Amino acid sequence: MTTDTQRPRHGAAILRTALRRNLGAMAWGTLLMGLYQAGETAFPIALGLIVEHTMRDGRSLQALAVSIGALAVIITTVSLSWRFGMRILQKANTTEAHRWRVKVAACGLQPVARDVDLKSGEVLTIATEDADQTADIIEVVPLLISSLVAVLVAAVALGLADVRLGLLVIVGTVAILSILSVMSKRIGSSTQEQQARVARAGAKVADLITGLRPLHGFGGNHAAFRSYREVSTEAKRQSITVAKVNGAYAGTALALNAVLAGAVTLTAGWLAFEGRITIGELVMAVGLAQFIMEPLKLFSEMPKYVMIARASAERMALVLSAPPVMTPGSERPPEGGDLEIDRVRHGTLTDLSFQVKAGEFVAIASYQPRAAADLAAVLAVRVPLTAYEGTVRIGDKDLADLSVEAVREHLLVNPYDGEIFAGTLRTNIDPSGTSRSVPEAVEASMLTDVVALHREGLDYGVRDRGANLSGGQRQRLSLARALAADTDILVLHDPTTAVDAVTEQLVARNVAKLRRGRTTIVITSSPAFLDAADRVLILDAGAITAQDTHRNLLANDQNYCSAVAR
């Protein structure tokens, strides 16, 4: 895996990338939205001209027909330009948001997390809400330009009637934007803090859901809920602060726009009273004063959206710019190679060394559960290579020289708490839809009773986290997924702790039969799996202290007998 030299390090770089990738869509969107705003502004101008000519030329059916035709053209232009302009911009917005979601998710889903102080719940918020708000910049810029077009068209039209009216619009617009730009900075900083606190609250919820059962077990749920209440309250207070700032901003923008529109109307009325503009020009000025409210409102809101997009982009940069905790190599392991652990020291593993030959079925009986978890983490590449001493080799190639993708294809570590996803039994067993051994995996894991229990079979719906399955069913479903992957080396960590003894015996025999000829390691204290293995390694005090068949160890090792006998 090569280092990505194009990672954006700042929010501004992310926004520039988003704008650069969508220049074509933004150009067309700007053109169409500018045409829309020009048409909107042209409507009161056309009305003024119609009144002017009517008063000058008297009643004429031909002039009336031309006027109606001109208004129809303007209305059609406004409708079509808005429809197609927004379609182009929203498609580009949605596509760009998807790109950033995928990019952030790819960083968060790396086997070894990036070196950034964010929990999974916070990364999820960044990959969803922040990605959407960052992509809004694609709509903001064209709308800002099109609003400016409307203001300029109105200023020019009013200036042709009387210079003072045109200058009033230009000076008033500049003053409004100057005031609101100062307020928008407060919105940006407040929004960034709100997003961070909401993300922390989301991360706390994710942690609570994951650990709810053990929390209930030792009575820690109330303390955990109080902790969440504190985080949630902070997020609520910050959200209220942001709402107040946004309300003040919107109220100020509306008031200033109304003042400018009122000033234009009163000035036009005074000029008409003085005889310096005609009645038609007065109608045009009054109409523009009303119509200009929309582009002015849109124009004045754009700085706020720019600051929100900038704040969200800065949060995405936290994830995207963070370097990986480790930089894996680019080689691939050979097919059918051995697995060797050479003097590994990590956590509770003090001096772990063993070798598993290609095609061998080995069980590891760990006397300390923590040591089993540390070993599984090392093999699953969840631990940075620099975080432990020693070497892991797959087919005589060091793990440090292999790409993580290649390791994942060659070696699969199935955790004891494998995640179950919303979908069906089939999509949980074979997420990619490419496995050819789904029936065999279902049979070997003894998931057949679950499939037979429901009329839909493998298409039976599964809720998020397997909420509609029992603990044993979830565990067997996870095991079926691992078996269906059909990797060269399979590591199972406590695959049957929630399964009854009879089923466990059948599963152990089935797994041994299905995996015959392929390397399989089971980290377990299950007598059924230990007996099915070619040999058993005893992991005690962080090192392999003995190895033999399960039955020989039962006969000759009293400590082993006490640890695994049930």
Image (cartoon, helix red, strand yellow):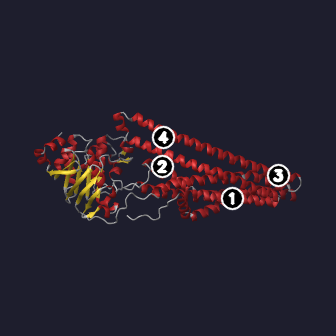
The three-letter amino acid code for the residue at tag 3 is Thr
Q: Earlier in the sequence, mark 2 or mark 3?
A: 2
Name the residue that disc number 3 marks.
267
Q: Earlier in the sequence, mark 1 or mark 4?
A: 1
Is residue 556 in view?
Answer: yes
Label number found at residue 125 = 2
Is 112 left or right of 508, judged from the image as shown? Answer: right
The three-letter amino acid code for the residue at tag 1 is Leu
Q: Is residue 563 above or below residue 325?
A: above
Is 280 left or right of 256, judged from the image as shown? Answer: right
Do the numbered discs 4 and 3 sit on residues whose CB atoms are within 8 Å? no
Name the residue that disc number 4 marks.
231
Q: Secondary structure at mark 2?
A: helix
- Indicate the position of residue 285 as horizontal and vertical percent values: 79, 54
Label number found at residue 148 = 1
Do the numbered discs 2 and 1 sit on residues whose CB atoms are within 8 Å? no
**Mark 1, other Cα within 10 Å: few <14 / some 14–19 / many ≥20:** many
Q: Distance of mark 2 from mark 4, alpha carbons?
A: 15 Å
Q: Earlier in the sequence, mark 2 or mark 1?
A: 2
**Mark 4, other Cα within 10 Å: few <14 / some 14–19 / many ≥20:** some
Q: Distance of mark 1 from mark 4, alpha carbons?
A: 42 Å
- Indicate the position of residue 459 as horizontal and vertical percent values: 35, 48
Q: Nearer the viewer, residue 16 or 147?
A: 16
Image quarter of the C terminus: top left
Image quarter of the N terminus: bottom left
Q: Secondary structure at mark 4?
A: helix
